[in-house]
Amino acid sequence: MARETFYITTPIYYVNDLPHIGHIYTTVVADTIARYKRMGGFDVRFLTGTDEHGQKMERSARSRGVAPKALADEVVRRYEELWRRLEITNDDFIRTTDARHRAGVHAVIARMQAKGDIYKGSYEGWYCSGCEAFFPETQLVNGTCPDQGHPVELLKEESYFFRLSAYQEPLLAFYREHPEFIRPGTRYNEVVRFVEGGLKDLSISRATIRWGIGWPGDAEHTVYVWLDALTNYISALGFGSGDASLYERYWPATLHLVGKDILRFHCVYWPAFLMSARLPLPRQVFGHGWWLRDERKMSKSLGNVVRPDALLERFGPDALRYFMLREMTFGADASFSDEGFLARYNADLANGLGNAASRVLAMARRYGDGRTPSESCDDSVLRTKAGEVVGRWRETMDAFEFHRALEAVWELLAAVDAYVNEKAPWGIAKTEGVSSPRLQHVLYNCLESLRLAAVMVSPVMPAMSARLLAQLGAPEAPGSLEWGGLGTGQPLGPEGALFPRADVEAFFSEVKVDESKPVQPPVSAPAAPAAAAPAPAPAVGVEQIGIDEFARVKLVVGTVRTAERVPKSKKLIRLEVDLGEPALRQIVGGIGDRYQPEQLLGRQIVVVANLKPAVLMGVESRGMLLAASLDGAPFLLAPDGEVAPGTGVK
Ligand code: ME8
């Protein structure tokens, strides 16, 4: 009999910037679910990919002076590398610049046209390129987009429209019949309220954007980026491009996993497009919460993102995957901090799991001649506890309550610890000898409980799980969740700490040292003052400082890549500056009364790179630009000739 299919997708990520913790979270959750479902015998298909078209991408590429496809190729390479590093087991990676995707989009449009749902008209209204979405004036909040506070611009252009208004009732009927379509329940209510509020026809083409999929039969238009992007979920299965066997096998999707920011696109537009194209609707959309930093959504446009590199390098993929799933209640928001990460790492991984494993394995080696115990045991408190924990773990994994599933496993680890203390194997060895059956039973119970824990954490920490199973002399994953899977008299695997304890103080001082390193190493040491030259007299009233004090200020040259006015401010301009770092730096400068944002693009400036971040009119500034000030008017400082971004100034 054919196995039940489980088709799971992540959003396809924009490639206008590098991935951050938010993108990692969605992808790691999807990977955990995919691994869990594979363990349960499902025929799993797991898709992720990148969203490469649209105005935002066109502008980012222009401001960096590269072609959009070249920027996409570079960022896609980083995504693919990151997913490999995090052991993500996606079966496919779709790019919206793939030919197969374009064919899928054209096929969907043809079906919508055949239904009579597309007509040509003229669009006038507000467009947010941050969200790539249209908003009626009544929804704007203080002149910015209501979803994320991005700036909006007035558009007036010819456009193809989709009769979204005709789908208000069919959508509401669909939600009523399928209350499980939108999860969690609070989000279901939000979407229903939104649709009950009325749906207007949707502009689905752009005449002023060139970077996109051409409208079929009309060279003047490109396809609206969300119609383009959402179709990835079926174009990746070959819909519209010849071989439809994957589409027939896996569509409709079991689960679209998305952040709550893009729920409306997935729960309103996407099902309406599919209804119009007379295609089946996905079974469920889950909108998870946001990782916050300082109580605000972590996002590229706010410049407050956590990049994964330092944590991954120091602690490896398993620790990061564990932290994200254990710390966040799936569906709710959570705050990300290095302190929180380190506390969990030490308490749960180094102490909890790592100590339980090394304690039990050390005894097994000492009393068992390097082999698993010679006898198993089927009568123990640990067996009962393990049975109860496995049941709870299954229930909570099925309900996507990952933090509770992990809590259950940690209860089993605590029970192993308590059992060891109570049974005191060292005492049995002393009084009854190492071959005592009672000692062998006790050790078996402990090792078998650890094996079950390793199997249960495998969807979250695959590499650690495989390592622990090898140390226990157990067969590798998938591994049975029945008690008694560990063989007797098997050689134990190689020793080694699973999670060495992190030195929190050293971590923070290292991070500090990293941050205070010059972006580019200085080319030469500062010149010593010539001994014979008389020191110039200090200017009266100016306090003197030593060279060391001056050297603490990290001055570097940066190239301005984007510039826009801070809404409602006369003077402030928000810049994204290339300082030779992996990501652009957001800096807000009070130069708007002398400079227009367009004049700044591509220009080199001098930046104080190690100034503490400050928030100016709600926008975070992570650095300061230098300008001469003449009667209060700013005159930007620049190097005398182009130098590499990040070059030090001294
Ligand atoms: O929206 N916390 O792409 P995107 C948790 N291309 N998750 C976060 C997050 C945060 N602070 N920030 C981002 C797009 N995410 C479109 C999608 S789908 C057809 C097109 C995650 O690069 C979360 O999954 O802006 C969110 O939905 C997604 O990244 C948005 O990624």
Image: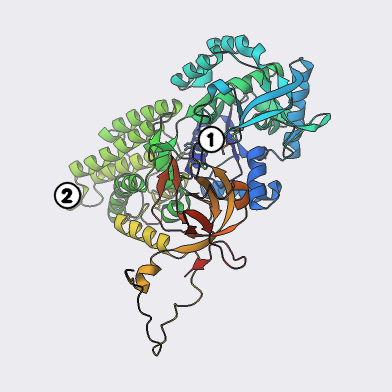
Instruction: Tell me, yes or no, whether the two marked residues, 1 and 2, touch with CB atoms within 8 Å.
Output: no
- Pointer 2: residues within 10 angstroms few (<14), some, or many (20+)? few
Residue 69 locus on image (x, y percent): 70, 47
Q: Quadrant of residue 645?
A: bottom right
Q: Which residue in the structure is indicated by mark 1?
A: 150
Residue 210 locus on image (x, y percent): 74, 38
Res. 427 mark: 2
Q: Disc 1 marks which amino acid?
A: His
Instruction: Answer with mark 1 or mark 2, whichever residue precedes in sequence.
Output: 1
Q: How many marks?
A: 2
Q: Is residue 225 above or below residue 363?
A: above
Residue 208 locus on image (x, y percent): 73, 35
Which mark's residue is nearer the viewer, 1 or 2? 1
Looking at this view, is 58 or 137 the one in front? 137
Q: Is residue 527 above or below residue 426?
A: below
The reply, left or right, for residue 198 in relation to residue 446 is right
Secondary structure beneath dot 2 equals helix
Q: Quadrant of residue 250?
A: top right
Q: Tell me which image quadrant ligand 1 sits in.
A: top right
Q: Residue at x 49, y 29 (%)?
A: 142
Q: Quadrant of residue 617?
A: top left
Taking the view exactly as shown, the residue that stands out farthest to the bottom is 532
Q: Residue at x 62, y 10 (%)?
A: 170
